[in-house]
Image (cartoon, coloured by chain):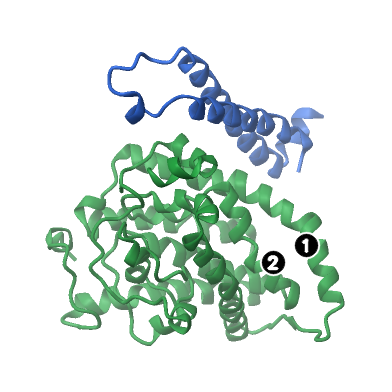
Chain colours: A blue, B green
């Protein structure tokens, strides 16, 4: 397996745990009540979520290319 | 077959009562497909016309569209029919399991854990290697391997249900609220790590050829998809003494703990019968875990890391 795959995989995993930290640091909707204002951290959470899916998705794509011999031809 | 199966009430026919050709058909379909795929792969191996593309076609590409079509046409329950968004979500879990979590964990077990197992095997008193060359021999070896590895799987799975610490890695799989063929792949990455342990442990004790593993995988892939499918499959007597069937596994996915804490064997039901956790009920009711509500994709990945209170409140 190409070690390059671990880069987007690591980015996705870090974003996942950062998003998890933000999720746990905010009260659940049931606890906060219906009239609670949206958290200022919500935008960060959205960004982290995109990074998470992007990182893991890229890792999956790269592994597929690697398995079929395309990655080595792209990276020389 | 007509849409009659979709329209009937939730109550199923009493266990083992065969009333028509339809019942016989749905009773023999699972054994024919599961054992048939094992015999097909064994024939491919012994006939030396095996290649990885054909294998992927039979094991991965073929069952999914076939079973999705069958679920649309002959679904067991209307309330389990998937929306397009849910189908896409199932596709996500299947793709991530097949192309990311599975290979990464597979690589992890190959090195360095598999080296440790090999060292244990080299020091074992009995030098056993299973490498039959006939079609029947390969199928028998694969089923034997399944029964042995299912013993470890059974206890790992049971511990996951009985301990909150281990439940957190298994909860993702039980938070499905509908049964469907691709939902066996809805497995948390941490759970892949734990449950994938059973086969390497058995292989460490009993060496098996790649051909036996290929036949065993064929059995497992088809059986796993059928057991989670929304099809009116019935348990075939005698076959269901040893092999897990769809009605048995649907009981395991019930939201009611009395039902979900039974039938731990997903491929082999024998150990549930031996250790007293077998349940032959067919009236499943609601599917899911906790409050029985569907969770977002992200929440399904995160719940393994939730504090206990938040996890049990889901």
Label placed on residue B35? none
Q: Are marks 1 and 2 on the same chain?
A: yes
Which residue appears at 71% of the width and 72% of the height?
Answer: B203
Out of B289 and B151, give the one closest to the viewer. Answer: B289
Which part of the image, by quadrant, shows the C terminus of chain B? Answer: top left
Rendering coords of residue B210 (x, y %): 70, 69
Asked if marks 1 and 2 touch (Cβ < 8 Å), the reply is yes
Which of the two residues, B313 or B227, is positioned nearer the viewer here?
B313
The answer to whether residue B227 shows anywhere in this view is yes
Q: Identify the image quadrant of residue B106.
A: bottom right
Q: Residue at position x 39%, y 77% from top?
A: B278
The quadrant of the image that shows the N terminus of chain B is bottom left
Q: Residues within 10 Å of mark 1 (few under 14, many from 20)?
A: some
Q: From the viewer's perspective, is A55 left or right of B271?
A: right
Residue situated in front as seen by the camera: B134 or B49: B134
| Label 2: few (<14), some (14–19) or many (≥20) C-alpha neighbours in 10 Å | some
Residue B287 place in picture, x, y as percent: 30, 55
Q: CA distance from mark 1 to mark 2?
A: 7 Å
Residue B114 disc label: 1
Provide the secondary structure element on which disc 1 rests. Answer: helix
Q: Mark 2 or mark 1, which is nearer the start of the sequence? A: 1
Q: Quadrant of residue B56?
A: bottom right
Chain at numbered mark 1: B
Residue position for label 2: B200
């Amino acid at each position: 397996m190409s070690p390059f795959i671990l880069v987007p995989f690591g980015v996705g995993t870090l974003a996942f745990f950062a998003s998890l930290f933000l999720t746990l640091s905010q009260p659940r909707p049931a606890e906060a009540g219906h009239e609670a204002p949206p958290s200022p951290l919500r935008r960060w959470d959205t960004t982290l979520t995109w990074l998470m899916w992007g990182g893991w998705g890229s890792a999956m794509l790269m592994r597929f290319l690697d398995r079929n011999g395309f990655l080595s031809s792209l990276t020389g | 077959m007509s849409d009659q199966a979709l329209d009937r009430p939730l109550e199923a026919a009493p266990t083992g009562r065969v009333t028509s050709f339809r019942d016989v058909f749905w009773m023999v379909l699972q054994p024919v497909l599961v054992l048939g795929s094992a015999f097909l792969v064994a024939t491919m191996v012994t006939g030396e016309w095996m290649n990885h593309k054909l294998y992927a076609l039979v094991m991965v590409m073929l069952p999914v569209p076939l079973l999705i079509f069958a679920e649309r046409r002959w679904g067991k329950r209307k309330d389990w029919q998937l929306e397009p968004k849910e189908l896409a979500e199932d596709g996500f879990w299947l793709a991530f399991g097949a192309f990311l979590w599975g290979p990464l964990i597979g690589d992890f077990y190959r090195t360095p854990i598999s080296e440790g197992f090999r060292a244990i095997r080299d020091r074992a008193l009995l030098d056993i290697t299973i490498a039959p060359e006939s079609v029947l021999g390969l199928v028998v070896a694969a089923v034997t391997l399944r029964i042995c590895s299912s013993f470890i799987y059974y206890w790992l799975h049971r511990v996951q249900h009985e301990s909150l610490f281990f439940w957190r890695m298994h909860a993702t799989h039980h938070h499905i609220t509908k049964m469907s063929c691709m939902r066996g792949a809805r497995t948390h990455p941490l759970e892949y790590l734990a449950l994938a342990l059973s086969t390497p442990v058995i292989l460490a004790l009993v060496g098996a050829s790649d051909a036996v593993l290929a036949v065993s995988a064929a059995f497992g892939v088809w059986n796993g998809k059928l057991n989670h499918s929304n099809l009116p499959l019935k348990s075939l007597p005698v076959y269901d003494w040893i092999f897990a069937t769809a009605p048995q596994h649907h009981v395991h996915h019930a939201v009611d703990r009395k039902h979900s804490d039974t039938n731990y064997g997903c491929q082999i039901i024998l150990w549930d019968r031996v250790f007293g956790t077998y349940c032959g009920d067919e009236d499943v009711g609601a599917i899911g875990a906790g409050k029985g509500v569907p969770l977002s994709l992200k929440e399904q990945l995160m719940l393994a890391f939730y504090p206990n209170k938040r996890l049990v409140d889901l």
